[in-house]
Amino acid sequence: LWLTHVAIPVKTASICLLLDHSGSMSGPKLDEMKRAAAEYVQRQSLPENQMAVVGFESSARVVCPLTKQPSAALAAINGLQPTGGTNM
């Protein structure tokens, strides 16, 4: 019996969450979006993968650049406040 070690390459992913936090999202809609986004972050294989968070309302802005730290993405999500209008 011969055992051979075979290295299987692991594919990594770069994920970007684009989250609407315009004024029309205030109240329960924003709370639900934050909850769903946080749950998504927690289900990802970080630090194998990396994730960025972009918030948009009147304009888009990176609120968390690519990171392998779930806590950074979660803090960015939790910090989103309803502002502006949706500019699509």
Image (cartoon, grey):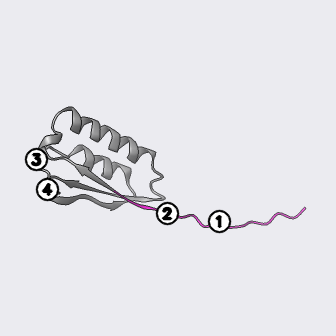
Q: Nearer the viewer, mark 3 or mark 1?
A: 3
User: Which residue in the structure is indicated by mark 3?
Assistant: 83
Q: Residue at x 34, y 40 (%)?
A: 36
Residue type for callout 4? Asn
Q: Earlier in the sequence, mark 1 or mark 4?
A: 1
Magenta part, dominant SS:
loop
- Residue 75 in the image: state x and y as whole percent: 27, 47
Q: CA distance from mark 4 to mark 3?
A: 12 Å
Residue density around tag 2, few if under 14, some if 14–19, many if 20 or more, within 10 Å: few
Q: Earlier in the sequence, mark 3 or mark 2?
A: 2
Q: Residue at x 24, y 36 (%)?
A: 31
Residue type for callout 2? Thr
Query: For residue 8, which numbered disc appears in the image?
Result: 1
The magenta segment: 1-16
- Residue 87 in the image: state x and y as whole percent: 13, 56
Q: Nearer the viewer, mark 3 or mark 2?
A: 3
Residue type for callout 3? Thr
Q: CA distance from mark 1 to mark 2?
A: 13 Å
Find out whether residue 4 is within the magenta segment: yes
Q: CA distance from mark 3 to mark 1?
A: 46 Å
Q: Earlier in the sequence, mark 3 or mark 1?
A: 1
Query: For residue 12, which numbered disc appears in the image?
Result: 2
- Residue 53 in the image: state x and y as whole percent: 29, 55
Q: Left or right: 65 with respect to 84? A: right
Using the image, determine if residue 79 lies above or below residue 28.
Answer: below
Query: For residue 87, which numbered disc appears in the image?
Result: 4
